[in-house]
Image (spheres, rainbow, N blue to C red):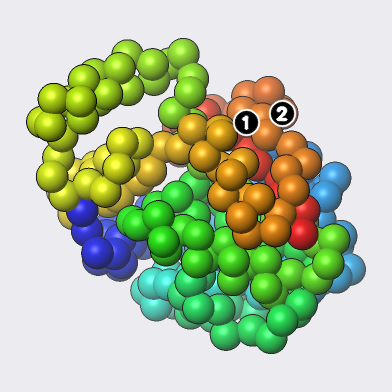
Amino acid sequence: MPASNLPYFSHPDVVLEYARAAVSVGLWESERVLCERFLPKDAPLLELGCGAGRVALALARAGWSDITATDFAPAMIDAAREVAATLRAGTGGAVRFAVADATALPFADASFASAIFAFNGLFMLPAAAAREGALREIRRVLRAGGVFIFTAHARDTPRTAGHWRDERRRWCSGAQDPALEAFGDYRHSTPRGDVFIRAAAGDEIRALAERCAFSVELSAMRSEIAPENERVREFSDDTRFWVLRA
């Protein structure tokens, strides 16, 4: 298991892919629906794992006026600033980009009214302790009643049932990848390097949210929230949205 996905997300080809997505893919319709419903436009918003600015810049163009967008990869933040300069029209200076580790956020308690961690980023932290640490940090920097939106690969869907049945057999027989921490973890090998992803069951996420003093307001697959265009479907498979309230 990689100690960090940082090498993968620092790879020039991955950074370029995310920069292109910030320009050509933009905000998913499902993201727009949930952000419009849950995230106030005139209060401080924190984005974690912002990549090259796909979500933050689209929200700024849609009227969100106070966005702090962070990523742990300096190369992604550099790309986000370049994309922001290219797309300056309509953002109104609403977005501030910063390098930050989600498990140790450099912000004071209760700094933000809402937060978002898009594109499965929270469950790409390659250790259960790191994921819980990040969620506790997000809770710390949110105001009471604040909302946190994120997505996670769903393990309990018909489309992936066969894969996870096979994985369960491997774990039961002791033949799993020895670098992985727990059933549900997997390591995706690409020419750009390995990337860790956890596919979490719903009860796991609900228990994690409760431990970190959140309540679950919504859990739904992207396809249940809104239809997406072809560019979005090519960019990402269906995924599960979670809306938590502090």
Q: Are marks 2 and 1 in contact (CB under 8 Å)?
A: yes
Query: What's the residue at 74%, 48% (across, down)?
Result: 215
Kindly identify which residue carries mark 1.
222
Q: Nearer the viewer, residue 191 or 199?
A: 199
Kindly identify which residue carries mark 2.
225
Res. 6 image quadrant: bottom left
- From the viewer's perspective, is residue 50 above or below residue 176? below
Name the residue located 89 percent from the left edge and 68 percent from the top edge: 42
Note whether 108 is above or below 68 in the view shown: below
Residue type pointed to by label 2: Ile
Left or right: 82, with 181 as reference point? right
Distance of mark 2 from mark 1, alpha carbons?
A: 5 Å
- Element assignment for label 2: helix
Q: Residues within 10 Å of mark 2 (few under 14, many from 20)?
A: some
Q: Quadrant of residue 75?
A: bottom left
Q: Position of residue 41 (x, y in %)?
A: 86, 62
Q: Position of residue 120 (x, y in %)?
A: 49, 47
Secondary structure of the residue carrying tag 1 is: helix
Judged left or right of residue 239, residue 167 is left
- Residue 20: tell me if it is visible: no
The foreground one among 194 and 181 is 181
| Relative depth, front residue between 236 and 20 | 236
Mark 1, other Cα within 10 Å: few <14 / some 14–19 / many ≥20: many
Q: Amino acid at mark 1?
A: Arg
What residue lies at 55% left-to-right and 79% top-to-bottom?
Answer: 105
Vertical position of residue 240 compared to residue 5: above or below = above
Q: Residue at x 74, y 37 (%)?
A: 218
For the C terminus, give its image quadrant. bottom right
User: Can residue 135 be seen in the rendering of this structure?
Assistant: yes
Q: Is residue 225 left or right of residue 48?
A: right
Q: Residue 57, labelled with which disc? A: none
**Looking at the rendering, which quadrant does residue 199 occupy?**
top left
